[in-house]
Amino acid sequence: MGASEQSNQTPDPSPGQEACYIASLDLGTTTLRCFIYDKNARVCGKAEEKVTLLYPSPERVEMDPEELWEKFITVINAAVSNAGLNPGTIRCLGLSTQRATFITWDRRTGEAFHNFITWKDIRADTLVKQWNTCLTMKMIRFVSSILYRILRSKRYLAASVLTFMNIQVNMRLKWVLENDQRVRELARKGHVMFGTIDTWLIYKLTEGKIHATDYSNASGTALYDPFIEDWNEFFLSVFDMPRSIFPELRNSVGDWGVCSPKFFGVPIPITAVVSDQGASLFGSCGFKRGDVKVTLGTGAFLNVNTGNKAHASVKGIYPVHGWKDKEGLIHMAEASSNDNGTVIEWGEHIGLYESASDTSEMAKSVKGPSTVFFIPAFQGIQAPLNDARATGGFLGLSADTSRAHMVRAMLESLGFRVYQMYSAMLKEADYELLSLRVDGGVAQNDFLMQMIATLTGKTVERPSSIDVSALGCAFLAGMGAGIWKSRAELIPLRQVDRVFHPQMDLQPQLLGQMKEWERALKRFTKWHTKSSLNRGQS
């Protein structure tokens, strides 16, 4: 789909009434999409642009801010045009963005000091390893464990097992401050601004009037403390990062300024800013404590609404924020698996099938229990195992193994990974986990959805549209503009394509297969040496 693609639906405002349309911008790792929604949450127009990732050296993954900005403006204008509207009919704009990708720029001129450094970038890997093993971190963990025993505060439980990762902003930002003398010196003088993608876009749209981020995006930086709901002054001091470079914290819903008329011809109010995973949970109407959302895209993200309390974990499940609106701040517990859609793409690339849509029927064609197992660890295994040295591959192949057996093993591995994360969450939660809601391209696979339902013993709801982050962002923006007054008004607008019910008679067999898969998984853990791991990451 290119920027010129039109929607099948056309706007139908009632005669004599002013149209209330919402522009929802969803910026992911590889695509930049804009959807135009009406007050009934129907898509009236859309457009898409590819995000260009730059690889200036093996360990670096960047984005050109100027190219991204040009595509950002282009895709919004194209979506409005494809909807058959003029910009004056757009009531508000909402932004949903990937987390943990950042940039720094000059407070005086707006000039960027470097490209966006994405969440996939590993230039700070040496710093990550140094800090994870340094005496300072050992002391922080030790003292935190003592404080937890005394005070029983979950904040200290989380700190007692704290480990830094390349995906987090903290070490990559520290790398910039240590290796770019100009940024370091100007930061000390108060002339540097830091921001994730949402912050930078807001700054550009308002022509420098607003330097802010919302709570959900801030919580993904690892420089923010979700337990006190503010920037982590302690670690900013430890890392020698000036507080002045960080943006103001704002509610996800509210006044985010107005787009300058020079960009779209008219001033458009910005009424929502939210992270992609927070927007996805909101678009799934996961408003209750215990609601579970699983996004099955390039990676798999399992998010649980934990209500008004941050989640503390010893299994690599992270406490982040979903959103903050007038009804309050919603905390999320998040577990992730880096390899999900990448497995499906790899299978197509090596010729196991012509299209991802073939995989469900191929898997169903295999009768009896699985004897072939696949480990989806191209980028290690994440929560709850958290082994960066794990590798991927098949086990149990024989002369009778067919492509269908291999495809089934691949799909089952994705289901087993989701259930691993779900089980870890279930053990740590002090509340009931409710039904599962899924989204993302891989959620279109019926075999995998039925498997997840049976493993978890929960119904799995698949929405009519996989673009749930964009829908959630539109919901939040519409609330900010007064189109909807409460979360309750949004529930009837959510459309479900299919509900998968657990097949409890098959659950014992499936759990037995998972035990065999976990036995296979042990063979693939701690495979890479440090040198081979670095080569693989590059």
Image: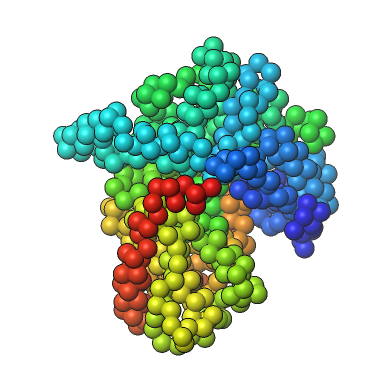
Question: Where's residue 202, x and y in %?
Answer: 64, 32
The residue located at (31%, 36%) in the rendering is 133
Image quarter in which the N terminus is found: bottom right
Locate residue 61 relative to residue 64 in the image: left or right.
left
- In the rendered image of this protein, does residue 67 appear above or below residue 297? above
Would residue 506 be visible to someone looking at this image?
Answer: yes
- In the rendered image of this protein, does residue 484 appear above or below residue 379? above
Name the residue nearer the viewer: 498 or 57. 57
Name the residue nearer the viewer: 480 or 116. 116
The residue located at (69%, 46%) in the rendering is 52
The residue located at (67%, 22%) in the rendering is 110
Locate residue 125 relative to residue 42 in the image: left or right.
left
The image quadrant of residue 10 is: bottom right
Numbered disc total: 0
Question: Where's residue 161, x and y in %?
Answer: 29, 41
Here the colouring is rainbow
Would residue 156 be visible to someone looking at this image?
Answer: no
- In the rendered image of this protein, does residue 264 appear above or below residue 371? above
The image quadrant of residue 60 is: top right
Locate residue 400 relative to residue 490 in the image: left or right.
left
